[in-house]
Image (cartoon, helix red, strand yellow):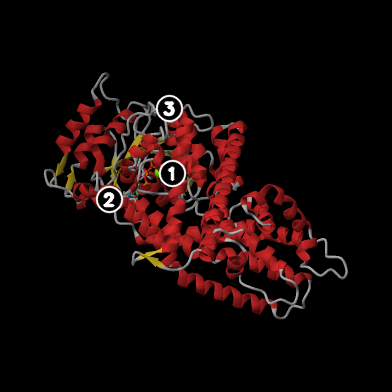
Amino acid sequence: MASPTPSLQADSTLHIALVGNPNCGKTSLFNQLTGSRQKVANYAGVTVERKEGFFSTPQGRSIRVLDLPGAYSLSSTSPDEDVTRDVCLGRHRTETRPQLLIGVVSATNLRLHLRFLLELRELGVPIIVALNMMDEAKRNGMSIDIAGLERDLGMPIIPVISLHKQGVQPLLEALDRPVPPPPAPSPSGADLHAEVRRLIQTYVTDRSAGQERLVDRLDRWFLHPVWGPVILLVVLFVMFQTVFAWAQPLMDALEGGITMLGELLLRPLPDGVLKSLLADGVIAGAGMVIVFLPQILILFLWILALEESGYLPRAAFLLDRLMALAGLSGRSFIPLLSSFACAIPGIMAARTIQNPRDRLVTILIAPLMTCSARLPVYTLLIGAFIPHKTVLGVLGLQGLVLFALYAVAIVSGVIAARIMTRGVKSEEHPLLLELPPYRRPNLKSLALGLWQRAVMFLSRVGTIIVSLNVLLWGLSSFPLPPQGATGAAIDYSLAGRIGHLMLTIFAPIGFNWQICVSLIPGLVAREVAVSALATVYALGVSEDAAPEKLLPLLSSQWSIATALSLLAWYVYAPQCISTLAVMRRETRSMKIVLGATAYLFGLAYFAAFVVFHLTKAITGEA
Ligand SMILES: Nc1nc2c(ncn2[C@@H]2O[C@H](COP(=O)(O)OP(=O)(O)OP(=O)(O)O)[C@@H](O)[C@H]2O)c(=O)[nH]1
Ligand SMILES: [Mg+2]
């Protein structure tokens, strides 16, 4: 149940915090308790900052709860774990020490998680143990003598399943009882590992012990030195193929719908400024971007399913050698992988990296990983310039080119990192990655995740993209052409003039003035370039010419060299203000941000230049 504002209840509110190892289900539990939708995924290091929530127990006790980043111990060495340590020790700058800790422990990983719990016991703070993932433990044939363990540990233990509301009911009820006294610490100098072994031997029966588990059987394939990388490649390949193949019918339908809606809305309006604003500024612009919703959702469906499946840390393990080539460790993999959705969470996830140099390099190359905002630009250009045909019988050429764009970005990231680290090996501890159990993605949470993405995307279109496009429309429509002018109005406008001026810089890489105009709003957010192109071209036709669709227009007006050059530009250019802002926040250095911006724009220009001239030489275009 969501609760009233904290300030009203400040005095009587119980302050609790969820503490435990990474991936034990703290955020799942937090979401069930508070009704929030914080990110949950099946790998270690998902939560990197504390999150606050409020709820009340069945009997009306109001509670403030903190979800903390997972930690292996209280002697942390990475910025995310620092938060957890500081809160637990009462040393945090803004948080008071919680009155009660919920020690979250996964029943499927007691060997590791009980150790941290024993460390928490030393703190002298009341603790309730939430023994999570009881469903999985039962399925694995495990049984735990909870009453015995509870007595031995001196802390109440509440079995929970954080996948659904009923699963956490027992914990809610426990929170209605008086706060337990702090547990007695272990005798000083006790060997915590030995203590954990004793506890498990005494209270846990694992009927599956000795049998080969599904995890091991799957890992034999997924981590195989030859088959592992082959499977990884196939997974990525299929992913990009489906982005085109599955999305096409949906995109066509959306496009048809938007065109119809536009006509319906615009028909009653007289020709003039208002009609042009709506048609060329809003509908052409926003419509052009909305069409890409299916592709973005398909990409996210894959990302969410992979995140939940437990496969990602395996991929990190396989790519450890590639990371070593870049002078980084496998620990940089997940932050970089998150950057494929969006560089912002990726840069934040770099907090899980202990070594400061590795962390900085990871942050600096994160914007090179292909975020989902590039997808509209990529697919627009691929759709216009790459023929829709299959090669080798089954592979779509368009999907193949998309795959290649991603691959180029990854290789560039590796090279950039190698230059920054000068190939010096990472001093990060050797990769001790936890391999989580495999899990079938839950359909409900997938659907919810996709829904959240769709809402986010549409609200971005409705806010940033529409406003930038309206602004661009204004710049492209005024000042009005002089009396008796013959060309398109945009040629006389401010944007038209700026575009022509920018040609001095961009003509050498094959950009025309329309592309230059679209780059300006595209600096704020990448997708805007697509809607901006739609607006610029819509305004570019003279009054009596019939409006044309953007795609055929581009393929008839641009040379392939220009299209490929723009694609190359988009692989590298740091056109996203929010990414630069997060970089500033995470590194606390404007110098780093300026350096990153300069190196990324430099790379973009260089790559576009090479691609443009190479393509021209190959195709023999003038
Ligand atoms: N079967 C099962 N899965 C669970 C349960 N609780 C959580 N999970 C899954 O466990 C994984 C990790 O959950 P999170 O809530 O992200 O774990 P966390 O402790 O917040 O992880 P970090 O933020 O990385 O420290 C996800 O795949 C969840 O769906 C449970 O009770 N049963
Ligand atoms: Mg979490």
Describe residue 437's horizontal placement relative to residue 553 as left or right: left
Quarter of the image for residue 390 reads bottom left
Residue flagged by tag 1: what amino acid is it?
Val
Describe residue 369's horizontal placement relative to residue 498 as left or right: left
Mark in front: 2 vs 3 = 2
Residue underneath mark 2: 438
Residue underneath mark 3: 89
Q: Which residue is located at x 36 percent, y 43 percent?
A: 177
Please, which residue is most extreme toward the top here?
189
Ligand 1 closer than 8 Å to label 2 CB: no
Where disc 1 sits, the SS reads: helix
Marker disc for residue 411: 1
The x, y position of residue 463, in whole percent, is 63, 58
Residue flagged by tag 2: what amino acid is it?
Tyr
Mark 1 neighbour density, 10 Å: few (under 14) some (14–19) many (20 or more): some
User: In the rendered image of this protein, does residue 364 appear above or below residue 566?
Assistant: above
Q: Which residue is located at x 31 percent, y 43 percent?
A: 318
The x, y position of residue 395, in whole percent, is 37, 63
Describe residue 453's horizontal placement relative to residue 517 as left or right: left
Please, which residue is most extreme toward the right here?
483
Where disc 2 sits, the SS reads: loop
- The numbered mark, 1 or 3, whose residue comes first in the sequence reads 3
The x, y position of residue 396, in whole percent, is 40, 65
**Disc 2 and disc 3: Cα gap in Å?**
34 Å
Instruction: Answer whether labels 1 and 3 touch (C-beta < 8 Å).
Output: no
Mark 2 neighbour density, 10 Å: few (under 14) some (14–19) many (20 or more): some
Residue flagged by tag 3: what amino acid is it?
Leu
Q: Quadrant of the C terminus?
A: bottom right
**Disc 2 and disc 1: Cα gap in Å?**
29 Å
Q: Which residue is located at x 38 percent, y 35 percent?
A: 325
